[in-house]
Image (cartoon, helix red, strand yellow):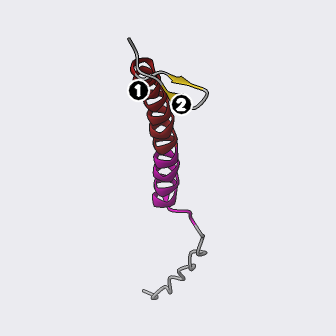
Amino acid sequence: MKKRVHKHSKSVARHVRPRKNLLVWVRGWMFVVVFAMMLGLGAIVGRFLSEKLNETTPQVAGVQTEAK
């Protein structure tokens, strides 16, 4: 019996983008969106509290007056 030589072809190295990069990208955008929502919510709550405080201490032309 003759010995046969098996030739193995080398696989071509392919650059495959890991899914980890996508996860990091999505997490980054989620952080940006949540941060923007928190800023918006803080602005809404701050304006509401400011209006409520101004109802109890009215101002006329930049001078505080006493509410009777």
What residue sits right under mark 1 in the picture? Answer: 49
User: What's the amino acid at mark 1?
Assistant: Leu
Image x and y of residue 37, in percent = 49, 36
Up-down relation of residue 59 to residue 25 (above or below): above
Task: Give the main secondary structure, helix, strand or loop, of the magenta stretch.
Answer: helix
Give the residue drawn at x 45%, y 88%.
3
Up-down relation of residue 11 to residue 36 (above or below): below
Give the residue drawn at x 49%, y 85%.
4
Image x and y of residue 35, in percent = 47, 44
**Does the segment drawn in magenta span residue 17?**
yes
Up-down relation of residue 34 to residue 22 (above or below): above
Res 1 quadrant in image = bottom left
Helix, strand or loop at disc 2? strand
Image x and y of residue 66, in percent = 41, 21
Give the residue drawn at x 56%, y 75%.
11
Query: Could you tell whether 52 is left or right of 32 in the image?
Result: left
**Does the segment drawn in magenta span residue 6?**
no
User: What's the amino acid at mark 2?
Assistant: Val
Up-down relation of residue 4 to residue 59 (above or below): below
Query: Could you tell whether 14 is left or right of 28 in the image?
Result: right
Q: Looking at the image, do the residues carrying marks 1 and 2 touch, with CB atoms under 8 Å apart?
A: no
**Callout 2 environment at 10 Å: few (<14), some (14 to 19), or many (20+)?**
few
User: In terms of depth relative to the viewer, which is nearer, 22 or 56?
Assistant: 56
Image x and y of residue 36, in percent = 52, 41
Provide the residue span drawn in magenta.
16-32
Q: CA distance from mark 1 to mark 2?
A: 20 Å
User: In terms of depth relative to the viewer, which is nearer, 29 or 45?
Assistant: 45
Between marks 1 and 2 in the image, the one whose residue lies nearer the viewer? 2
In primary-sequence order, the first of circles 1 and 2 is 1
Q: Which mark is residue 63?
A: 2
